[in-house]
Image (spheres, rainbow, N blue to C red):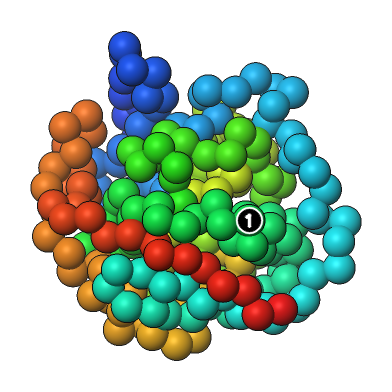
Amino acid sequence: MKGKLGTIIAVVIVGAVLGVYYYNQSKQETPILDGSGQAVNKEEQQMPETPETQTVSESAVAKIETSEGTFTVTLNGKAAPKTVANFIKLAKEGFYNNLKFHRIVQDFVIQGGDPKGDGTGGPGYTVDAEIGLKHTKGAIAMARMGDEVNPTKASSGSQFYIALQPLAQLDGQYTVFGEVTDGMDVVEKIGRAPVEPNPFTGEVSVPLRQVTITKITIND
């Protein structure tokens, strides 16, 4: 990837089939990517169901309980109906229960929603890109594979991140589908968790203590 997001280095992890990590050497331009797409074929990368055809509330609220406290997110079903429908579906199924925030980049983002817990997992499919909303402080958006293997910018099926500050450099690249409307102090507390370098990428983002999502409750 060239230009504004800089050079992305893909590191293939061999042996345990952990997939691909992507890392940009500038924290301010670090892309929010996951490796889940490498583990599935083209047929599996389609939505197994069609939540996008359901009627989605334009302002459903997700209460996200974590080991560090609770915060709420207002989901924008008007701007990103497919993404919101999928997030609600997974939350109601308990998919996110007890998953950890596997990536914390201080003053940048917190990222979670990976059942493998290493940034390479997902539900086995991607979601169509719905790019439009801005990365304001507290914005919640979906991770995705890099443009080289994902030219349509399709989102991860489950991995999401929350911006710890405005991140205009990511606008137009990822699907933002809501924002934190209460408990941003909890999100910031998670963002201050002590971290160490990722042994595969060098990015200082691996939490030294586990920070988990207890459960996500949807009020739609």
Give residue 151's quadrant in the image: top right
Is 120 or 141 nearer to us in this picture?
120
Image: 129 above or below 1: below
Image: 26 above or below 16: below
Q: Is residue 66 left or right of residue 91?
A: left
- How many numbered circles does the render carry? 1
Give residue 172's quadrant in the image: bottom right
In the displayed orientation, state which residue is furthest to the bottom: 182
Q: Position of residue 11 (x, y in %)?
A: 31, 23
Q: Is residue 46 left or right of residue 99?
A: right
Q: Position of residue 89 (x, y in %)?
A: 68, 58
Residue at (20%, 47%) from the top-left corner?
A: 206
Is 31 or 59 nearer to us in this picture?
59
Is 178 or 169 nearer to us in this picture?
178
In the displayed orientation, state which residue is furthest to the top: 15
Residue 76 visible somewhere in the drawing: yes
Q: Position of residue 67 (x, y in %)?
A: 29, 68
Q: Position of residue 159 (x, y in %)?
A: 49, 49
Q: Quadrant of the N terminus?
A: top left
Give residue 153's quadrant in the image: top right
Give the crowd class for mark 1: few <14, some 14-19, many >=20 residues within 10 Å. Answer: few
Residue 154 visible somewhere in the drawing: no
Pointer 1 residue: 93
Q: Quadrant of the C terminus?
A: bottom right
Q: Is residue 33 left or right of residue 84?
A: left
Residue at (25%, 67%) from the top-left corner?
A: 191
Q: Is residue 32 left or right of residue 211?
A: right
Circle 1: element type? helix
Residue type, label 1: Glu
Residue at (46%, 36%) from the top-left corner?
A: 121
Residue at (73%, 71%) from the top-left corner?
A: 77
